[in-house]
Amino acid sequence: MAEIVQGTVVSLIAGYYDVQTPAGVVRTRARGVFRKNREKPQVGDSVQVKLDEQGLAYLVKILPRKNRIGRPAVANVDHVLLVISAVEPDFSTALLDRFLVFFAWQGVEVAIYLSKSDLLEKEKLAEIESQLAYYQKIGYRVYLDRESLAAELPKQIGESEIWTLAGQSGAGKSTLLNFIKEDAGQATGAISTSLNRGKHTTRTVTLFKLGEGFLADTPGFSAIDLTPIKLNELCTYFKEFKALSTGCKFRGCQHLHEPKCAVKDQMALGEIATFRYDDYLAMRTEIEEGRMPEYLK
Ligand SMILES: Nc1nc2c(ncn2[C@@H]2O[C@H](COP(=O)(O)OP(=O)(O)OP(=O)(O)O)[C@@H](O)[C@H]2O)c(=O)[nH]1
Ligand SMILES: [Zn+2]
């Protein structure tokens, strides 16, 4: 009797798809039907696997995808662990806000990790930490050191959830991944250690088990483009603006020059950070002009 089980594609190896099922990882072949439909299973896909009498396993169905992000792409990403560095490259809320808006637009939750805090003197670090406290206040989980992150992360990754890293080039994504993997008692696989770090080489991606779900073992992506975002929806991707917008006089208030705007009122009272509002205006300009700022290219 053939049996059908459901699972998550955790890696692609030379035409085989490794699928994590409740009974363990099963190495499968994709059915020819995918080639015909030009469908290609991807890491992160939720799939059905058929096990036949000979013990052979076939990937027979891809369930609908929630999203597809990163390079190489991971499907069905639930959560991004955003690595933002204190220095090299310098911390900036403008940069942080770009990532937060981009992922909010993609419908993906974000947790923030501050890297390279060891390279900064106390006063400067305190300034960054006070800015990050604001992000914590508006609802983001923030980690200031990798030890607490490594201890907490497995508890945060829910049943079958897929997490991936993101952050600017050089922010410390690979360094963090290696630390987490060691901490989780997982050997760094041959694929990861032999990675060619050249800029335009394709990297493979594997999901490894962490907590109740998975973490992608490849540093996600660094460059983001906000220009496809609809201008009048931009403000809904700023968590605290969105929460306040029901208090604005006008529905669809863009929090610019409209009268009785709750966002501007709260900013005047110091409840909304002016740097967030400035970043919002800068992103509006970027979207209106349809191009990324020069310094980010
Ligand atoms: N002192 C210190 N150095 C760090 C830390 N995290 C990363 N680095 C260093 O920063 C440099 C860049 O780190 P990577 O982990 O390669 O950065 P990445 O985000 O993976 O970069 P890309 O692969 O270009 O996207 C390396 O030289 C690391 O050793 C940290 O927390 N403290
Ligand atoms: Zn408003």
Image (cartoon, rainbow, N blue to C red):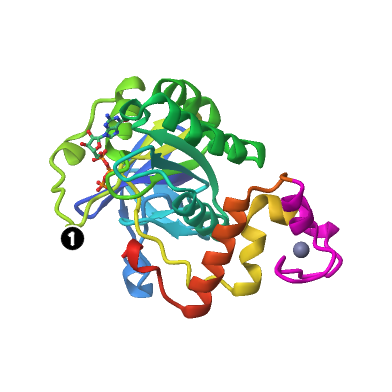
Tell me, yes or no, whether the highlighted magenta stretch contains residue 146. Answer: no
Dot 1 crowding, Cα within 10 Å, few <14, some 14–19, many 20+: few
Residue 111 vertical position relative to residue 71 in the rendered view, above or below: above
Q: Residue at x 16, y 37 (%)?
A: 193
Residue 130 vertical position relative to residue 52 in the rendered view, above or below: above
Q: Residue at x 72, y 65 (%)?
A: 255
Front residue of this view, candidates 228 and 260: 260
Q: Secondary structure at mark 1?
A: loop
Q: Position of residue 74 (x, y in %)?
A: 39, 53
Q: Position of residue 272 (x, y in %)?
A: 69, 48
Image quarter of the C terminus: bottom left
Q: Position of residue 205 (x, y in %)?
A: 29, 47
Name which residue type carries label 1.
His
Q: Residue at x 44, y 43 (%)?
A: 82
| Total marks in image | 1
Front residue of this view, candidates 257 and 213: 257
Residue 153 vertical position relative to residue 42 in the rendered view, above or below: above
Q: Which residues are magenta?
A: 244-269
Question: Which quarter of the figure has residue 238?
Answer: bottom right
User: Does any portion of residue 282 appear in the rendered image?
Assistant: yes
Tell me, yes or no, whether the highlighted magenta stretch contains residue 252. Answer: yes
User: Does any portion of residue 157 appear in the rendered image?
Assistant: no
Image quarter of the N terminus: top left
Horizontal relation, residue 33 to residue 163: left or right: left
Question: Where ligand 2 lies, by image quadrant?
Answer: bottom right
Q: Position of residue 126 (x, y in %)?
A: 49, 29
Horizontal relation, residue 249 to residue 135: left or right: right
Question: Which quarter of the figure has residue 91?
Answer: top left
Q: Residue tagged by mark 1?
A: 200
